[in-house]
Amino acid sequence: MKNVHVDLERRSYEIHIASGLISSVGRLLKSIFSGSITAVITNETIAPLYLPLLETSLRSAGFDISPIILHDGEQFKTLDSMRSIYEQLLECGLDRSALLIALGGGVVGDMAGFAAATYMRGIPFVQIPTTLLAQVDSSVGGKTGVNLPGGKNTVGAFYQPRAVFIDPLVLETLPERQLRAGLAEVIKYGIIRDPALFAFIEERLDSLLHRDADTTASVIKQCCMIKSDIVSRDETEQGVRAHLNFGHTLGHAVESLTGYSAYLHGEAVAIGMWAAARLSRTLGLCATADVQRIESLLASAGLPTVVPSFSVSAYMGAMLKDKKKTGSTVNFVLTHRIGEVALHPVGQERLRAFLARDLSMS
Ligand code: NAD
Ligand code: GLY
């Protein structure tokens, strides 16, 4: 078992990482939750795969379980789905003594976390992430919420889980495209913080794509350590946590312009990282050799690096709606070298020129 500690004083918790961990969740929960009532929030794809295993583990540890099965998809990460979750929690008779368990990818985790943050003014929850993206990113750090038609993750709360249980074996059933999308976030950690991790991914990409258990568990742990360190220093994104948004400013614009359906989140982030690396070079912040390594690793991981064709104005409009803008400048996380990023305000004219000249947009 590999453990990573998230240090947030009263809200500190452990990230447990081990193959086959789902079967031990019931026993491990006993040490952090004294009640016996739980609701497992999952979706229609994950439930047949992993809910029986989790239920067995929870029942044998004496827990009572109400499963709540959501539709599968980012398009269901909405306030309508939240209402349905609240109603089902009420119907199951859950009160403030209950525990919510999120079993799924980032969509389930973000919604279950938001339900936990808001139901009865807050009940405890734990995360059991089942996608690579959720295991290295979304299950850790307490960002929860849903999308509005006008913007992604626009309604939500910072609300930390009581624990995160990561079982890398569940990735065996993850569709290949989802695995690659998760790798985008893994590559992100290398770029923002850890040149050795970046080099390790370059070297062991095949093992990661073939889901080699040891390599995958090791990479997940390294990513969780980086995320834990960042979140412990800046829980609510007043500073260094913004570094985790590398690639997200243009990535979110890509997702929004393509109606959240053409690209997976990790794929949009890959496009955004590719563009952010180029912008870093254009602004004289980063050497061409580093930009080339980033481009080459993204391409080898089978991630998209072509910015979809929309007008400069469309991209500007989408980026200016981003939560990370201040006034008329967009705050971009840009790379200085592999392993180091910083926040740079980029003025609208500079950005327009970059999109038009460097990315050949009209
Ligand atoms: P997802 O939750 O939609 O899962 C991807 C697909 O894989 C779904 O169809 C899901 O049912 C399926 N799936 C999940 N686990 C599986 C498994 N083990 N085997 C087979 N199929 C499985 O997508 P995601 O990439 O995990 O998460 C994306 C979401 O996470 C976005 O909504 C994004 O905004 C959010 N996010 C949140 C944070 C955060 O800090 N809270 C960070 C990054 C992303
Ligand atoms: N995924 C970005 C964050 O957690 O801050």
Image (cartoon, rainbow, N blue to C red):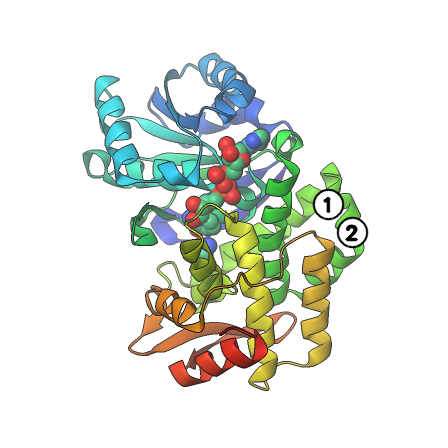
Q: Taking the image as four quarters, which one is ligand 2 found in?
A: bottom left
The answer to whether residue 123 of the structure is visible from this angle is: no
Are the two marked residues, 1 and 2, in contact with CB atoms closer than 8 angstroms?
A: yes
Q: Which residue is mark 1?
A: 208
Q: Quadrant of residue 249?
A: bottom left
Question: Could you say where residue 281 lies in the image, as x and y percent from the top left?
Answer: 61, 81
Question: Picture coordinates of residue 124 (x, y %)?
Answer: 32, 35
Say which of 185 and 279 sits in front. 279
* Figure check: 92 above or below 225: above
Q: On the picture, is 82 further left or further right than 40?
A: left
Q: Position of residue 285 (x, y in %)?
A: 59, 83
Residue 262 x %, y %: 50, 48
Q: Which residue position holds label 2?
A: 204
In the picture, the quarter occupied by the N terminus is top right
Kind of element beneath mark 2: helix
Seen at 64% across and 46% down, the residue is 180
Question: Residue at 50% of width from left, 28% of height from top?
Answer: 28
Instruction: Give the side of residue 70 with respect to residue 164, left or right.
Output: left
Frontmost residue, 318 versus 210: 318
| Amino acid type shown at disc 2 | Arg
